[in-house]
Image (cartoon, helix red, strand yellow):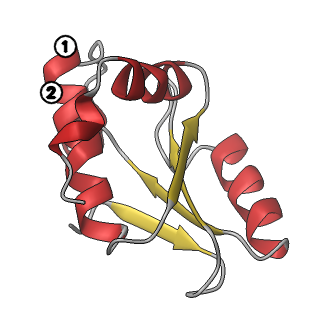
Amino acid sequence: MNNLIIDGPEQGPLFLFAHGAGAGMEHDFMQDMATRLAAKGIRVVRFNFPYMVKRAEDGKKRPPDRAPKLLEAMTQVIEDVANGQPIVIGGKSMGGEWHHCFLSMNWSSRLPV
């Protein structure tokens, strides 16, 4: 997946950091937090949800995708980066809420063990 920004040491604990509804993975807040965590030895993976990828391509604001599409995007990123290692997931505002839904809806059961 080329929709990723990774900060921090390659062997550091892995943190998947999702953006909020209105600003993508490159927002100043996201960059600042990723830099601070990386300085503490944490490997931070940022990604854009599909609607934000489209916004970056055409410049048009759009609302977030529906739950299944957001959860599928999260699953794909985890599959792409975790390589079987433990991962902490979280985010800013909407990104944090969807990570909570990901776990509470047992969506994580779709991941290979």
Question: Closer to the camera, 77 or 106?
Answer: 106
Q: For the point 25% across and 60% down, which residue is it?
A: 113
Q: For the point 24% across and 61% down, which residue is it?
A: 79
Q: Residue furthest bottom?
A: 10
- Residue labelled with disc 1: 66
Instruction: Note whether 40 is above or below 110 in the view shown.
Output: below
Considering the image in quadrants, where does the N terminus appear? bottom left
Picture quarter containing residue 53?
Answer: top left
Q: For the point 63% across and 70% down, which residue is it?
A: 13
Residue 50 visible: no
Q: Is residue 100 left or right of residue 11?
A: left
Total marks drawn?
2
Label 1: state its secondary structure.
loop
Residue 43 visible: yes
Question: Closer to the camera, 107 or 57?
Answer: 107
Instruction: Note whether 41 is above or below 32 in the view shown.
Output: below
The amino acid marked with disc number 1 is Arg
